Amino acid sequence: MKTQKLLTALLLFVMCNSSIGQGNLTPPGPPAPTMKSLDQIEARTPISSVPYTISSPGSYYLTANLSDSWVIEGGILLRRASSLAGTNAITVAASGVTLDLNGFTISCTLGESTGAAIWLNSGMRDVSIHNGHIQGSVTNNGGGVYGGNGFAYGISYSNNWPLNVLVSHVSVSGCLHDGISLIKGESSVVEGCTVHTVGGNGIVASTIKQSTAMDCGNSAINGNQVSDSQGQCSGNGYGIYAATAQNCSGFCDGSGTGLYANTATGCSGESFTGTGLSAYIANCCTGLTDFGTALSVTHNVNSF
């Protein structure tokens, strides 16, 4: 009897609940897009030809390889351009600028090497340059004499020092003077960059990390804090010159110093006729030379 009553109650419960309306199960329409465009997140200004002057703060990017030989118009048409000799390809005339080279190359192969690929006007600050290539056609004759067409500088500045400048993942080659030249004492950072075949300094900045400068007429790498980097000069300069150097190697083909630092840790230096490694404090470092001084250290800790 009890079982009969339980079954009857369960049947009534199911019948009552099955009669409750379930609502409209048909979706009202396709879902609306929720993603923002890149311009909504960060408005960016394209650069499709050179010379170009950045006169307002903001974000800029290259749309193609740019050179003094050919430029792109409208993304399709190619035309012959005038030489960049004596002028700068891109001039940064505003603070608060991000310049994305977007994996492209700025090149100069015509005329005398007197301009720069990227030039920071006097007193610019809060500038970021990254992800691309700068290429001139200056070469080393094998004896430390540099000459040819193209850029005088890869990235450099005018008069008053630039403040808070970051250059990352940029390669520079074939410049008559400096590759990446910033001021050492004003929060400038160069990270993950390469420089090859420049007649002056390779990389100059306050902090230099994970970078390489080879075949430089003067000092290859010159910074306050230098780490995980490699430099090679062809004359009487320095492969690496730093206040503090960590896990670095410097080499000089001539009479200069392979690596110099106030404090060097885990570093190596080599010179042909000069000093291999010179430091006030050297911890776990090595110095080599063919005809000079291998190691010149005031306080030596496990170095040889």
Image (spheres, rainbow, N blue to C red):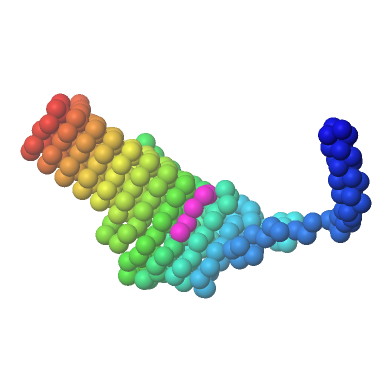
Task: Report whether residue 79 is seen.
Answer: no
Whether 284 is drawn above or below 241: the answer is above
- Looking at this view, is 109 or 251 the one in front? 251
Is 38 in the magenta? Answer: no
Identity of the residue drawn at 41% across and 56% down:
166
Q: What is the number of callouts on the image?
A: 0
- Looking at this view, is 130 or 24 the one in front? 24
The prevailing secondary structure element of the residues shown in magenta is strand
Q: Quadrant of the C terminus?
A: top left
x, y percent for residue 73: 70, 61
Identity of the residue drawn at 17% across and 42% down:
263
Instruction: Describe residue 72's horizontal placement relative to residue 206 as left or right.
Output: right
x, y percent for residue 252: 26, 36
Q: Quadrant of the N terminus?
A: top right
Task: Report whether residue 189 is seen.
Answer: yes
Identity of the residue drawn at 35% across and 65% down:
163
Residue lying farthest to the left in this orientation: 298
- In magenta, the rendered stretch is 128-132
Is 130 in the magenta? Answer: yes
- The image quadrant that residue 113 belongs to is bottom left
